[in-house]
Amino acid sequence: MEDLIGHNGVAQAELLSFIERIERLEEEKKGIADDIKDVYAEVKGHGFDAKTLRRVVALRRIEAEERKNQESLLELYMSAIGMI
Amino acid sequence: MEDLIGHNGVAQAELLSFIERIERLEEEKKGIADDIKDVYAEVKGHGFDAKTLRRVVALRRIEAEERKNQESLLELYMSAIGMI
Amino acid sequence: MEDLIGHNGVAQAELLSFIERIERLEEEKKGIADDIKDVYAEVKGHGFDAKTLRRVVALRRIEAEERKNQESLLELYMSAIGMI
Amino acid sequence: MEDLIGHNGVAQAELLSFIERIERLEEEKKGIADDIKDVYAEVKGHGFDAKTLRRVVALRRIEAEERKNQESLLELYMSAIGMI
DNA sequence: CGCTTAATATAGCCAC
DNA sequence: GTGGCTATATTAAGCG
């Protein structure tokens, strides 16, 4: 781990610099996450069901083929135990 | 996936057995969760602030977990950046 | 908050007793949660897809009517945006 | 839920617009998450232990948050049970 | 009962 | 490629 031992200052500065870069990025990321939350709140304010909308967004993420696989597997299990 | 395809009954029974074991365990778990809720209600009835007590319990849990961790490398880094 | 102020010992003992009861219950709860995890591991070892099985268990929890509601709402949204 | 029923187009457009806003934000968020990952890779390339650095960053975040909390009541309880 | 925190479940990542 | 660990997303609980 370089010459961190001894606190020679170089590695310290390097580490701190990395940490600060990361923290800045995490702040940005949190900002966007908050924006997303705001949109869902707005969605709700327009009378839509946010939970369902989340599912829609999630489903759009998985491509159609994969979704079909998942659903048919689910149905297979459900059918196997007599749920459907 | 075994011989689930075809619904031959063996895998079906196996699946259902797993499901029922899980559901039984989840019921037990819910029972205990309810017990915990009852204790907090009792706490409140004795004039204590339940919310704060929750924080105390959470803190004690975190501390107990942390105690298990070796912290030396972490401290080295923290020391390197002047956090401790 | 009773006579906690002053550390008169009575409230202290009471508090600690509550905390320990809660902690014991939480330990039990955690034990059962671990058991559930073990069952899912076993499920996997038998060649089943644990993730799908989790969905089955979750679906059994919501009663049929509620499930139908959720699914039809989802389909309505998906249809509205041309997903299906 | 407004006039979604009937697919009159207005609610459809609204829904789609919300979805697209969310998806755009999620893309941005993912971009930043990737940037963070890149920094950790760079960290590693400089001979530091990324996992430990993650813990440092997490600790700094927690401490920053905690600083915002008033802790008096909590400390009262902790003192009452001999934690501090 | 809505709205904010805490618990849980899922997913992604990294090391082996 | 599997298993543990971290981070995120979802769900549930508690509070006003």
Image: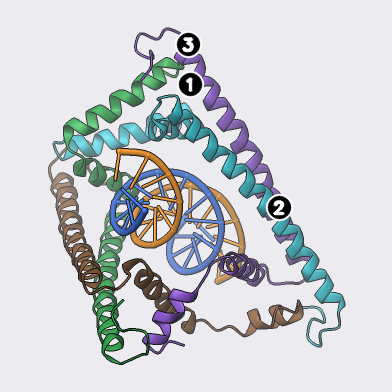
Chain colours: A cyan, B brown, C green, D purple, E orange, F blue
Q: Can residue B62 be seen in this view?
A: no
Residue D30 lies left or right of residue B24; in this view the side is right
Q: Residue at x 19, y 42 (%)?
A: C60
- Residue assigned mark 2: A25
Tell me the distance, in whole angstroms, between the alpha carbons under discs 2 and 3: 38 Å
The image quadrant where one finds the C terminus of chain C is top left
Name above or below for residue C61 compared with residue B25.
above
Share a chain, discs 1 and 2? no
**The disc labelled 3 sits on which kind of residue?**
Val
**The disc labelled 2 sits on which kind of residue?**
Leu
Front one among A9 and D62: D62
Residue B31 lies left or right of residue C74; in this view the side is left
* Chain ID at mark 2: A
Which label's residue is closer to the chain start, 3 or 1?
Answer: 3
Tell me the distance, in whole angstroms, between the alpha carbons under discs 1 and 2: 30 Å
For disc 2, the neighbor class at 10 Å (few under 14, some 14 to 19, many from 20) is: some
- Residue assigned mark 3: D10
Tell me the distance, in whole angstroms, between the alpha carbons under discs 3 and 1: 9 Å
The label on residue B2 is none
Image x and y of residue C39, in percent: 25, 61
Image x and y of residue D12, in percent: 46, 15
